[in-house]
Structures are given as C-alpha cells and as structure tokens.
Amino acid sequence: MRTFHDRSRSALGWTCLIGMLLGFSPAHALPGDPVWTTPPSVGQNVGSSPAISPGGMIHLGGVDGKLVAFATNGTALWSFATGGPIGSSPTIAPNGDLYVGSYDGQVHAVDATGNELWSYTTGGPIYSSPALAPDGTIYVGSSDGVLYALNPDGTLRWAFTTGAEIGGSPAVGPDGTVYVGCLDTFLYAFAPDGSLKWTFATGGGVGTPAVGVGGNVYVGSFDQKVYALNIDGAEQWSYDTGGRVASAPAVGSDGSIYVGSYDGASVVALSITGALLWTYDAGGSVYSSPAIAADGTVYVGSFDGRVHAIDPATGLAVWTAPTDSAVVSSPAVASDGTVYVTSVQGTTYALEGVAGGLASSVWPMFGQNPVHERVMTDTDLDGDGIFDSWEALYAQFGLSPNDPTDASLDRDFDTNSALLEYLAGTNPGIPNDPVTGAELSIVPGDVAPLGAPDGVVDVSDATVAMRILATPSFVSLLPPTQAVMTNAATDFNQDGVLDFGDALLIQKEIVKP
C-alpha cells in the first residue's frame, strides 16, 4: 500500500526545494516533491492551466495579460503581452503555434518564439480555451455568447450565438462534433460546418465537457450534477455531487470519470455507467480539473492551496503538495511524469510525478492532452455504429472493432443488444433492467442448493436453472421458508417473475470459462 506523504511536513520535500534553489537536483525525489517553482511576481493566475509542447516547453497565461513560456528547468524563455488578463489556457498546434484568449476580447495566435501571427476580436472577454480540430479549425467561446470557428489564418469560418455567456471550453468528438457549454443551462452540439445538431438542458450553467469512451460526452453543471450523454444527446445517467460543478471531467483508462465539485464532495469518481466509486475531501472547493497519471493516480488542485494525488482504487490521498495560495488551474502532466500547476498568486510549480506521463485514456486531463487540442480521436472500423474504443473496453464480452455483427449481440441476456447498451451507457456484460437500465448487483448463477447461495457456481446451480426452465413457477417446488430467498437470489432481471429470462442468465454464468 502506498504511503500518504504531506509535503508541508516532509523534510525531504524542503531539502528538494532548497536543492532546486541552489541549482542541483535531488537524487531520490519522491512523488509530490517540488522540482522547481517560479516566483509569484510572474503574474497572478485566474485559471489558465499549463500547456506543454512536445519539446517540453511550458506555456500559460496570467492576470498581467502575458502568455509566458518556460523551459523544462523553469527558466522563463519569452512572454507575449495581450491587452488584458488571461484566464484562457493556451492551445498548441502541431507546428508549435499557440492560440489563447484574453480578457481583451481577442483570440491571439503567436509562434513558438512568442511573435504574434494574428488576432481575432470577439464581442467580449474570453474565458474559454480554444479547441483545435484536426483540419486546423480553432473553436473558442466568448462572454458575448458566441461560439467562433476560426480558420488557421485567423479569419472567421462561422459563428453561432447562444443564449448567454460561454465560460467553458469546447471539446471535439471523434466524428468532428463540437460540444460547448453555456451559462444559459444548455450543452450545445454542432456539426463541423456550424449547423446545430442538438442541445441538452441542465438546471444551471454548463461548464467544459470531456469526450469519453465511445464518443460519450461528460459535463458538469451548476445544478450540482455530472451528466453522461450519448453521441445523439440522449442522457445516459446523471450524478448529483452536492455542489456546483465547474471542473471539467477526466476519463481513466477503464472509462471511470473523475470530476471536482465547488461546494459538495470535492472530488467524485464514477464508473463508466455512473455508479459512485468514491468521494475525496480535498479540504476546499475544487474548480481545477483532474489529470490522471500513467499508473492511474489522480492529480487535482484545491482551494485549500494544495495539489492532491489520489489513489484511484481507494480514493485515499497518496500525497499532497502545498502551494502559496488556492489552486484553480488544472494540472498538466508531461511525458516524463512531471506535474505542472499554477496557484492564484501566479507561482508555477513543477512537482515530481509518476514515470510514464499520462494515463492511456481517451481524455485523461483538462484539454485532453498536454497541448490542449481538446479533440477525442476514435474510429468505427467495422461500421456497426459503435466507436472502437467502447468495443475495445468490453472485448472480454466478445466485442471487437473488426466485427460488424457484434452490435446485435446480447452478451448478458438482458434483451439489450450491444448497440443499445452502447447508446444507453450500460455494461454489455452485466444484466440490466430493460426498463431502467440499472445494473444489478448479483452473484451470477449462485442460487444453489435450492435458492441458498453457497458462493460457488457449479452443477447444483445448473440443476436449479433446469428446474426454472421446466417449471412455470419454480417457487412452487420449494418449501415456503425458501421461497422468499429464492425470489431474491434468482430473479436476476428483477421483473417479479422467475422465468426463462432468469434461467438464461444463470446458464450463461454456469458455462462461462
């Protein structure tokens, strides 16, 4: 079991920091130890999160209106001044160009050395961070309520006026659909040509979405809920965190969703089907979006002035690292595992992380990847209507990205095909109630002897299954004292009847290798 380390009390942590100030690197730094920090005079931070270029250069904006670039050792390389504070996080193009919004109402494009290429003026301050589609289109929202699509040269491609300010950042799905949240309580979905595909209404202002396994969309709202939607905009599930959700969700390698909450449970972990895995108290509200390391460790900043590292299996702290003030920016994880984060006082921290960089996931951090492109890439190789990432996640149930026939299969015998389970957001290998979609908590097939589960799925369970198949009412075969127990143990599809459907579920588990 990993040990919890509080860096505010770690002698080694202070030794590492002193070593950095003196210009040498500690030989045995632990995760969470500071590698370097910048002085707070660089400029206060209002939420701009670091973006990391493929070469390791770190870029972020500040209240002083400057976009700053740092080398991997913390040396400031250049800065570019905009006309107002920068709350937007920069996005880095494949050629090294950067795009960032400013409170001056402009989207600024600069090259890799900090020279301005162009700017585009919107109708209000920009809090939204740009998304960069594979064709080079730049999507960004503005406080004027307009979502702008810009060409790589800074000319307008199209614009759409929503019903209120856009504070969140767009995300692009695998089919090119552009998703953006708005304070008018709606999540909007647009085709790449700017035509509106659908809207989804929540009970409050909508934040920044993330695109998960299979192209499903996860987004938080000020109505305190996290929503899961399929690619058609239909709700799969929602979870009430108990507090406003401004944090953008992150998705783990197993499809789990991690998100922060303003005044409820600080960090919430949910399964891909919306079941609560754990909650974590970060000592204060969490505006920061989580980032997930290669080993699954979840990093997040908090209003308590710390960066928290959370064990994904237990929901317990692995370590915390103190900063000089609240942390509202989202952590960024470099390819070597270093964690970069900025406090509201404008101090940037490089913290020792887990080797291997980010988790192997479709959306492991704010902005999807270290350059903040905000694009989830996926394919449907067999053309069965299910994105390949979802079929790969459930390969143990016989699904394959190369088999167009598996979309019609009902692997768990609950009357729902794999395609229906995909659209509903349920697990194709666990029986679901056909009406509610709720996954059942059962010990599959363990109903023997005569309805008294013995912890083993074996031939005695097969006998019970055969009796269910052969008898209209299996309960009539049992003594009265066992009838109620049998109802609870064998009515797998919870329809109030012990019948053929239950028998199929039992038999499936008996023959499973």
Image (cartoon, rainbow, N blue to C red):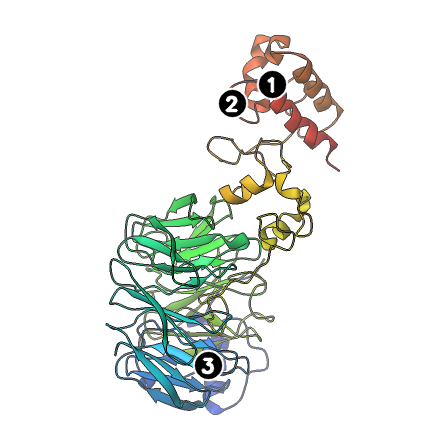
Q: Earlier in the sequence, mark 3 or mark 1?
A: 3
Kindly identify which residue carries mark 1: 499
Residue 357: percent from left, percent from top: 57, 70
Q: CA distance from mark 3 to mark 1?
A: 62 Å
Q: Is residue 286 above or below residue 469?
A: below
Q: For mark 2, what is the residue?
A: 495
Position of residue 290 relative to residue 45, above or below, is: above
Q: Image height check: is 293 above or below 482?
A: below
- Residues at marks 1 and 2 touching, judged by CB atoms closer than 8 Å: yes
Instruction: Find disc 3 in the rendering and name its residue.
Output: 58
What's the amino acid at mark 3?
Ile
User: Which numbered circle lies on residue 362?
Assistant: none
* Mark 1 neighbour density, 10 Å: few (under 14) some (14–19) many (20 or more): many
Place residue 245 in its image quadrant.
Answer: bottom left
Inspect the image, locate mark 1, and give the three-letter code of the amino acid beneath it: Asp
Rendering coords of residue 292 (x, y %): 51, 63
Residue 454: x %, y % from top left: 66, 26
SS label for mark 3: strand
Identity, as a three-letter code, of the amino acid under mark 2: Asp
Please tell me whether mark 1 sits on a helix, a strand or a loop: loop
Residues tagged 3 and 1 counted as in contact (Cβ below 8 A):
no
The image quarter containing residue 473 is top right
**Mark 3 or 2 closer to N-term?**
3
Q: Residue at x 52, y 36 (%)?
A: 439
Q: Front-most of 175 and 24?
A: 175
Q: Is residue 39 visible?
A: no
Towards the viewer: 50 or 443: 50
- Front one among 192 and 445: 192
